[in-house]
């Protein structure tokens, strides 16, 4: 009877979690892609936009695109496109669905490990509704957070089953031992899949070790403790080895892609001081989630007073957790979970230019929630009136968090809304200026966009991308000379950036220097292979340039054919380029046929301008004349 009652309560808790979480995150159903990372992960990624394919799988496992190796994340995006198309809503629904599943898995693990349904449910509600997690759920590019979270919680559940089987000593020990190995294998598999979703999970073996202390109870304060501890450490070696391999792969890719910041940009002392300050700041935002932003600018310096206060505060909590480790092991375990899981992204190894990020707290915050809920429950044990008051406060906290999460989800509706909010709650935020400038740029508000990009160059003059974006806006404004100055500054700051070379080529082309344009198109293609835009632009120039020294029909055909292959012959503009290349190579029948296909494709896509251009050129190719021979 008691078991049935508990089952009904568990089912009710799960139902409430699902309903309340969906209600809190309802705005994400209307969210668009944002111009921060989403173009690279989905919106403008041709490998993803073509859906799931063997070529896509090969690319996902071999690429270090955007400075990370997370093949399962790429495959998940491809799968959504394959099933539902490139619209943003399915991608947002997938993120939210994963977050809901993660919440239920967390509840399942805690309840199974502790038997405390009420406390486990409280932690699950905090995880589901805390505003710090909005970034991970509402940002399509952060699929890696919720996907790695799925495999993390599956790892915990499989490991918990392994521990249960390992504790059984009976006549069926061989059967039990076999089951234990299966569950350990499942835990190792889930851990590996999680690492392939986001390498931040490298500290999971450490988390499992502290869970062995509590709530799994595998290490007892007895004389046999050290021997048991040694065995449990050895037990984690396969997972540690797997984590080391992923670390090596990730560091190699990040270093090769230029994602890792040098010590000259971010000195070790500044990194260490910012790391300590960030640990304290994350605690503050966990307790009072105000002024959240998608990007927090890296400080030029950390005031000594801030550093000392943060260090003393963290040391004090660590001391209390250690002192209470026997009577209240939940406090030590939760605190170490928080410190350990956050360590890979705390900034000692610097990737990116942000000081901290809300998304980094998606899994580390669970440790804080566990310590808080179990700590409060232990402190109030035996005080019925205080327990009732705490329970009432908990019930009131749920709608408060849900409303706050709902409001924060609205911030992610589009790039403009996101950037304006960040500018309101932070200062000197170059990333937010770029985000807002990009939004205005896409709306055709070029002067306003250029103004925000120019402000970004003032805030971060040593960051190459701000000069790149400023140069793009100037180029679109029809100002090739100022654009060239901005783009040359970007090149000086980062000579190996493929995008900078691409836009330098476009600026030189607009300025009439076709030889330099060809040179920079080639350089962009060398730095990053198979960019359809680069291949198409270069092929067009080689096929249509007035300068005979530049024209090369044979190479133009090769490049244009590759661009059409990459776009699966779906882009009329690439097909038109291929037609021009065929004509320059003297293949006029092929040129005419391809121009006709390009015209039909353009009409199908509703692009009347491109269709009209190809119709005009069709007559030229039928007459046996190349583009540069136009009357």
Image (spheres, rainbow, N blue to C red):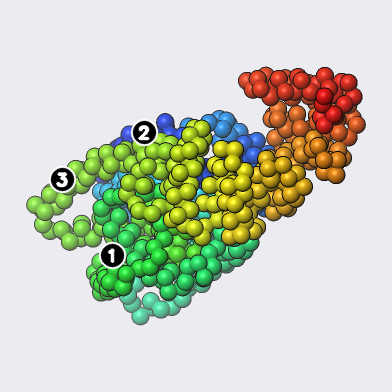
Looking at the image, do the residues carrying marks 3 and 2 touch, with CB atoms under 8 Å apart? no
The front one of 2 and 310 is 310
- Of callouts 3 and 2, the N-terminal one: 2
Q: Which residue is mark 1?
A: 331
Residue 392: mark: 3
- The answer to which quarter of the image holds residue 404 is top left
Q: Whole-percent x and y of residue 66?
A: 58, 52
Distance, label 3 to label 2, CA atoms, is 26 Å
> Is residue 438 at least partly visible in the picture?
yes
The front one of 259 and 113 is 259
Q: Which residue is mark 2?
A: 26
Q: Residue furthest bottom?
A: 223
Identify the secondary structure beneath mark 1: helix
Look at 35% across and 37% down and name the residue there. 410
How many tags in the picture? 3
Circle 3 or circle 2, nearest the eye = 2
Q: Whole-percent x and y of residue 485?
A: 59, 52
In the visual, does 248 lie left or right of 14?
right
Residue 480: mark: none
Q: Is the residue 365 above or below the residue 11 in the image?
A: below
Distance, label 2 to label 1, CA atoms, is 34 Å
Identify the secondary structure beneath mark 3: helix
Q: Whole-percent x and y of residue 311?
A: 31, 72
């Amino acid at each position: 009877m008691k078991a049935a009652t508990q089952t009904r309560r568990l089912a009710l808790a799960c139902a409430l979690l699902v309903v309340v979480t969906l209600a809190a995150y309802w705005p994400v159903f209307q969210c668009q892609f944002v111009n921060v990372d989403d173009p690279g992960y989905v919106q403008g990624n041709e490998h993803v936009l073509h859906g799931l394919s063997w070529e896509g799988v090969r690319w996902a496992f071999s690429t270090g695109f955007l400075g990370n190796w997370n093949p399962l994340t790429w495959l998940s995006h491809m799968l959504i496109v394959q099933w539902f198309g490139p619209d943003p809503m399915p991608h947002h629904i997938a993120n939210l669905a994963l977050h809901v599943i993660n919440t239920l898995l967390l509840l399942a693990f805690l309840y199974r490990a502790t038997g405390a349904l009420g406390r486990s449910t409280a932690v699950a509600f905090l995880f589901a509704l805390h505003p710090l997690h909005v970034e991970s759920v509402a940002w399509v590019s952060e699929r890696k957070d919720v996907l790695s979270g799925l495999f993390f919680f599956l790892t915990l559940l499989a490991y918990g089953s392994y521990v249960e089987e390992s504790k059984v000593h009976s006549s069926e020990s061989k059967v039990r031992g076999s089951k234990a190995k299966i569950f350990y294998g499942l835990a190792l598999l889930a851990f590996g899949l999680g690492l392939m979703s986001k390498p931040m999970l490298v500290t999971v073996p450490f988390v499992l070790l502290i869970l062995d202390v509590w709530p799994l109870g595998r290490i007892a304060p007895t004389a046999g403790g050290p021997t048991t501890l040694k065995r449990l450490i050895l037990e984690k070696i396969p997972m540690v080895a797997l984590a080391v391999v992923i670390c090596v792969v990730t560091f190699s890719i990040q270093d090769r892609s230029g994602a890792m910041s040098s010590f000259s940009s971010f000195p070790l002392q500044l990194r260490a001081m910012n790391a300590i300050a960030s640990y304290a700041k994350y605690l503050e935002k966990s307790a009072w989630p105000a002024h959240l932003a998608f990007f927090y600018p890296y400080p030029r310096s950390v005031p000594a007073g801030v550093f000392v206060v943060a260090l003393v505060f963290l040391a004090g909590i660590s001391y209390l957790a250690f002192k209470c480790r026997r009577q209240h092991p939940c406090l030590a375990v939760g605190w170490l979970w928080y410190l350990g899981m956050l360590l890979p992204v705390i900034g000692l190894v610097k990737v990116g230019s942000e000081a901290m990020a809300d998304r980094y707290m998606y899994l580390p915050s669970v440790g804080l929630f566990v310590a808080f809920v179990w700590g409060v429950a232990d402190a109030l044990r035996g005080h019925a009136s205080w327990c009732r008051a705490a329970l009432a406060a908990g019930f009131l906290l749920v709608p408060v968090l849900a409303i706050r999460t709902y409001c924060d989800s609205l911030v992610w509706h589009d790039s403009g809304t996101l950037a304006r909010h960040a500018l309101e709650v932070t200062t000197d935020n170059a990333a937010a200026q770029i985000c807002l400038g990009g939004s205005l740029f896409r709306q055709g508000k070029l002067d306003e966009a250029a103004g925000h990009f120019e402000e970004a160059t003032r805030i971060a003059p040593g960051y190459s991308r701000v000069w790149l974006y400023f140069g793009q806006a100037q180029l679109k404004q029809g100002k090739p000379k100022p654009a060239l100055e901005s783009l040359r500054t970007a090149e000086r700051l980062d000579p190996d950036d493929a995008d900078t070379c691409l836009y330098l080529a476009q600026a030189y082309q607009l300025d009439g220097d076709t030889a330099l344009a060809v040179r920079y198109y080639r350089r962009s293609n060398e730095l990053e292979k198979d960019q359809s835009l680069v291949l198409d632009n270069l092929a067009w120039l080689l096929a249509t340039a007035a300068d005979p020294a530049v024209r090369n029909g044979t190479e133009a055909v090769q490049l244009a054919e590759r661009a059409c292959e990459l776009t699966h012959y779906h882009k009329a503009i690439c097909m038109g380029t291929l037609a021009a290349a065929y004509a320059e190579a003297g293949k006029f029948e092929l040129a005419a046929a391809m121009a006709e296909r390009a015209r039909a494709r353009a009409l199908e896509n509703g692009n009347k301008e491109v269709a009209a251009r190809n119709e005009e050129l069709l007559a030229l190719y039928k007459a046996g004349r190349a583009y540069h021979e136009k009357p």
